[in-house]
Image: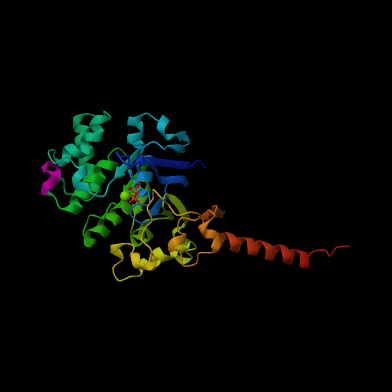
Amino acid sequence: MTALIETRDAERTFRVGRSLFQAARTLKAVNRVSLSVAKGEILGLVGESGCGKSTLAKMLLGLLEPTAGEILFAGQPLYSIPRLERARRVQPIFQDPYSSLNPRQTIAAIVSLPLRVHGVGSPTEQKKRVAEILDLVGLARRYADNYPNQLSGGQRQRVAIARALVMRPELVICDEPTSALDVSVQSQILNLLLELRKELGVTYILISHNLAVVEHLATRVAVMYLGRIVEEKDTESLFRHPEHPYTQVLLESVLTPEPGLGIPDSQLGVAFPNPIDPPSGCTFHPRCRYALPRCSTEAPVPLRTNGSLVECHLSLERAAREHRAAAAADTATGAAPQ
Ligand SMILES: Nc1ncnc2c1ncn2[C@@H]1O[C@H](COP(=O)(O)OP(=O)(O)O)[C@@H](O)[C@H]1O
Ligand SMILES: [Mg+2]
């Protein structure tokens, strides 16, 4: 089956810090990421602030070209798809609905803009479609003539969702869609996203630094650390058997009294490293409670088994031990040498 969206060793670097006294340096925000999202999935993408989630999201939206590697949408290079077509098929929902909504336009004008840009239907048909989508996102039709500042945060996010979905996109990329909202409103919006998936058959990529949110919604989860995907599994396995030491710490943070606060630094000891100057070997090693000597010198290679991925020397060593044990058992039970 062709993936709906797929990245192959996608990389994005930025040149930063150029000043009179300093040469520009390269920051690798996304470092050779290979991901594949099938139609109908909800891929959760988690990791601390600064690990590269939004950069990857912008690359998947067609807003930021990779500096290396490939991104394929329905088997076609994403950046070869004309911009308008791309915008019709892949839509974003961002964290702050206020800054992404034009304050001088009415809700009806904001939601119908994509229809007008793409020349879909007559003005009467557009009006009908706006009314339908407002119903679908649970916003009373009487708000159509209001302006964004007359709405609450949750209502504004419903408008942003309506605008994202009005063209019936195949993929919706939600970057921290509820982080700016009150906790009580957050779950309403998340449940709305789930309902709309059933209703419209959209595929989601859901970015959040909050694992509790992702556990509730995602079918599969990718954990990102300093530009790399360090673990990726179906949601249930990830939460039951987190393998990467970083994932384990993230999960412990979900069990803290206020999971909405995200990832407490205390459990990781050392602060998030500077991405311009990442640690050698496995970039997580200075914060890892199980680090082995080789972790500081040698970057682990990804270990892929039955559709899951983990990138950690501990897992590689465990797999090698199991392989040796299985081989020894085969020798013991197999035909004895003549
Ligand atoms: N336009 C840019 N120019 C320079 N550095 C950037 C730019 N965008 C992001 N970065 C850097 O890339 C890294 C990843 O950022 P981002 O993708 O926003 O992470 P996240 O969304 O996980 O918080 C950060 O170190 C950030 O400072
Ligand atoms: Mg971000």
Q: Nearer the viewer, residue 163 or 305?
A: 305
**Dominant secondary structure (helix, strand or loop) of the stretch shown in magenta:** helix
Q: Is residue 135 visible?
A: yes
Residue 305, quarter of the rendered image: bottom right
Q: Which residues are magenta?
A: 142-150
- The answer to whether residue 103 is above or below residue 238 is above
Q: In screen coordinates, is 318 left or right of 116? A: right
Residue 208, quarter of the rendered image: bottom left
Image location of residue 123, percent across then percent down: 19, 30
Q: Nearer the viewer, residue 116 or 335?
A: 335
- The answer to whether residue 164 is above or below residue 263 is above
Image location of residue 226, percent across then percent down: 41, 52
Q: Nearer the viewer, residue 9 or 305?
A: 9
Q: Is residue 199 visible?
A: no
Q: In screen coordinates, is 146 left or right of 131? A: left
Q: Residue at x 25, y 41 (%)?
A: 163
Q: Residue at x 36, y 34 (%)?
A: 86
Q: Which color scheme does this rendered protein use?
A: rainbow
Please identify the residue farthest to the front as the structure is shown.
21
Residue 165, quarter of the rendered image: top left
Image location of residue 302, percent across then percent down: 54, 52
Q: In screen coordinates, is 128 left or right of 252? A: left
Image location of residue 107, percent across then percent down: 16, 42
Please identify the residue farthest to the right as the structure is shown.
338
Q: Residue at x 49, y 65 (%)?
A: 241
> Does the segment drawn in magenta span residue 261?
no
Q: In screen coordinates, is 45 left or right of 166? A: right
- The answer to whether residue 164 is above or below residue 183 is above
> Does the segment drawn in magenta span residue 149?
yes
